[in-house]
Amino acid sequence: MNIQRKELLVTSFALFSLFFGAGNLLLPPLLGYNAGENWFWVTIGFMITAVVIPIIGILAHARLQGTLFDFGKKVSPIFSLIYCIVIYIIAVAIPSPRTAAATHEIAIHSAFGTSPSLTSAIYFSLVLVFVLNRSKILNLIGKFLTPFIVIMLLAVIGIGLSSSAFTTGISQIETPIVTGILEGYQTFDAIGAVVVGAVIIVSLNFKNMKVEAFESKRKLIRRSGFIAGTGLFIIYAGLISVGAYYGSEIEVNSELSSDMQRANLLRGISIASLGEFGNTVLSILISLACFTTAIGIVAGTADYFKGLLKDSQTVYVVTAIIACVLGVVVGQLDFKSIITVAIPVLLLIYPITIVLILLNVMPEKLATPLIFRAVIISTILFSIPDFLGAIELREFVEPFVEVIPFAKYSLGWVLPAFLTFVVSSIVQLKITRDR
């Protein structure tokens, strides 16, 4: 069955928009600004965790065409259940409220001076309306919101680069690629891949999308993933390079919190490229980008618990309401506070998510239950020092950090996970041959 161009474009735009939220817009420019002359290398690192891994996650969804539970069930059903619950709690407790906090701080408060509680209440009320009308999510986001977001982003990047002096400052980053990789964690894109990928699967099951056959959906999701990934790559690279090239023209007060540095830099770039109208453009951009991501997170969470409890529509509605109420409560915090809480959690859950994504796109013979279990256990064990270090318990893990390769870069899990994969694959091959 041929995939219609309209369905492909709508799904691609929707997927891009569900990925592209607050962190995706705010993080890259300051990363480029601090990287200076090394902006290209920091971009490479950022793309690994903010584009490549998430798109592989979408490919895994295309292969499985199930729920998030299917990602971890080969480890064990209990592990997968716990992992899913943790992921969805994190999603509605951190990245979803963060979208409201970013919208308030950058787009709403500066224009209207309203309180965070009012902004969050209105914001998540609108999110709830869209989530409860989920059959229209793909069409609305894919046809209308995302093209508008992409056009404005390309205008800011294109005009910004064309009017830039193409001079960069001295790099303030010692390890550009590693810094880019870790900064990519904060976009939540890998977690977003396993959450919003499920939203795409469920949305494609609605009759108005006219995609029913397994192979047709697989092709559609894969192609949409590549298109969305290409879009993310272009936008991220553009934002990082603009941040680097405007480093000598826009002064960012180093005494400000990092979130305000990000906001001020992005505002400065928007004004430099589009004049005073840039402020308006920035406000609309952030509001739309954040809003579509929040919709994807809440819908994905509600979908999961609906499926977990006998496909109950009541559960879907109740879960969506709870997620939105939690968003209102946490959304009253400032962007910096939410990021501070997020970092330790990400250092523990992100490696597990990355490994699950990679294993789920591998051939069956390289991704048996034995291999799943061994690699996941190794990843969890070697991620614990990073987690403890992030919550100010570094003295307890310092001896391990000194001997584990890459541990000082918060990547101590990488080599052990790879070696475990190799060893467990050899063991699995031997077991198979002995049968």
Image (tube, helix red, strand yellow):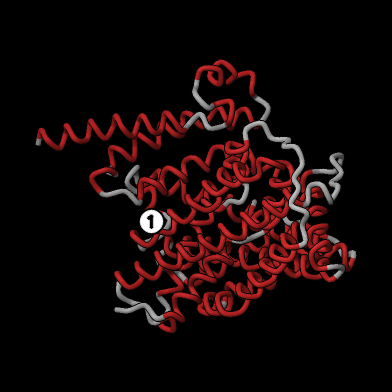
Instruction: Please give left or right for residue 368 compared with residue 406 in the image.
Output: left
Instruction: Please give left or right for residue 130 compared with residue 101 in the image.
Output: left
Q: How many labels does the image show?
A: 1
Q: Position of residue 246 (x, y in %)?
A: 78, 52
Residue ID at (77%, 65%): 282
Q: Where is residue 359 in the image (x, y as percent from the top left)?
A: 36, 45
| Residue projecting furthest to the right | 113
Residue ID at (58%, 36%): 178
Residue ID at (81%, 70%): 280
Instruction: Please give left or right for residue 405 compared with residue 243 in the image.
Output: left
On-image quarter of the C terminus: top left
What residue is disc 1 on?
Answer: 60
Q: Which of 242 and 89 is in front in this view?
A: 242
Q: Which of 20 and 204 is in front in this view?
A: 20
Is 148 placed above or below 160 here? Answer: below
Q: Where is residue 379 in the image (x, y as percent from the top left)?
A: 44, 34
Q: Is mark 1 on a helix, strand or loop?
A: helix
Residue ID at (34%, 67%): 218
> Label 1 sits on what residue type?
Ala
